[in-house]
Amino acid sequence: MTRAVAFCLLILTLGFTVWINIARADSWHATGDLGVVIERASGSLLIVDQSERAEVGRVEGLGDLSHASVVFSPDQRYAFVFGRDGGLSKVDLLAQSLVERVLQSGNAIGGAISDDGRLVAVSNYEPGGVRVFDAETLEMVADIPTGSKTIGLVDAPGRQFVFTLWDDGETWIADFSKSELKITKIEGIGENPYDALITADGRRYIAGLFGEDGLTALDLWQSPPIPRRILPGYGRGETPLPVYKMPHLEGWALAGERFVLPAVGRHEVLWVDARTLEETGRTKTHGQPVFAIARPDGRQVWVNFAHPLNDTIQVIDTPSGEVIHTLKPGPAVLHMEFTPRGHEVWVSVRDADRIDIYDTRSFEKLGEIAADTPSGIFFTARAHRTGL
């Protein structure tokens, strides 16, 4: 074989290799650009691309997703879906397939993934308690009975999970950092805690109370944490309104140096100093707030509302605490999710079967995606944020 022929063969081989690699690269997808939308009526998960503002796939067969939530593995490849029917599903976002599904209880209300990504915990109404699973195999590694419905389950630093008991008004801390599980029980949280949040630094855990006006805060840096009641009697002297939908605290809003929290059954949000935990103000809103979520830079808070006023979103300016813009995307706005740096917000409009996408500064509508009765929207950036 002459040198010329050998050289031509080499060029052809290299060219073929480059072509193969380019073809493969075209089929790759960065996980950090992905997100999922819960399609509650059909029990499916819509996989979306943030940059393309488009659907890229759908995974079906996930059971009852009427009150579903999602967490992600550290590599952002796998979504763990917590269904209302007690189902725990592991979904591969790249293969767009269901990896494993276990029916771990009769009625579940959310879950969390440990900071090392190795454990997935599920909060249960029936039979109550928390069950913890290996994130790789979904084999159960711990069953924590409580004798109560559990709510407000979050991850905390150091391979810990924190959750609260609806019936008993206690918060428990489950520590998996050692070979033997350690449970710390904190009494005196209040009457019928309904949900809870944890701040991004893992220090503050705040439980909302349904049985009384107020919330209870724990400083998890204390050992043991001591309950501190905040906003006690914030509705004192006023006739209680019927509660059409419980507020959600999971999408906690720390806006600048203040928390903004939805008031139970009231047409207002409450502002609390993040250092002193004292009330600093209130903002009147269009209806009973469900989610009050801060844009990632904290400059705005976006609020949606319970039925029958759930076609509306209000945007609150953080420094002034005033409503600066109102949008009406359509019937049954259930969930909002900011892109990681907050330039866009994605909004589920359940009864219009679509996701709307807005610019968060101009409030211009940028696009929409068809979805079957969408509710929760979750972007994979949550994989690297405590409590989400």
Image (cartoon, rainbow, N blue to C red):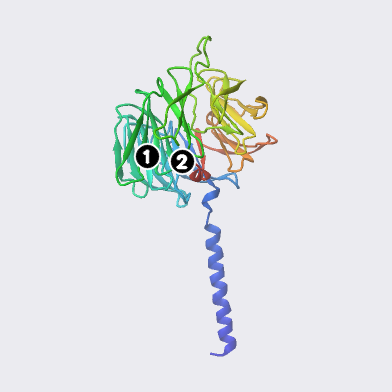
Residue 23: x and y, percent? 54, 63
Q: Amino acid at mark 2?
A: Leu
Q: Amino acid at mark 1?
A: Ala
Q: Which residue is rendered at x = 48% and y = 20% of the image? A: 214
> In the picture provided, is 206 more to the left or to the right than 88?
right
Marked residue nearer the N-terminal end (2 or 1): 2
Residue placed under numbered mark 1 in the picture: 121
Q: Which mark is residue 278?
A: none
Q: Are marks 2 and 1 in contact (CB under 8 Å)?
A: no
Q: Is residue 255 above or below residue 246?
A: below
**SS at mark 1 in the image:** strand
> In the picture provided, is 362 more to the left or to the right than 96?
right
Query: In the figure, residue 270 lies in which quadrant?
Result: top right
| Residue 332 at least partly seen | no
Q: Which residue is rendered at x = 59% and y = 44% of the image? A: 53
Separation of residues labelled 2 and 1 (CA atoms): 20 Å
Along the viewing direction, whichever of 247 and 160 lies nearer the viewer: 160
Residue placed under numbered mark 2 in the picture: 45
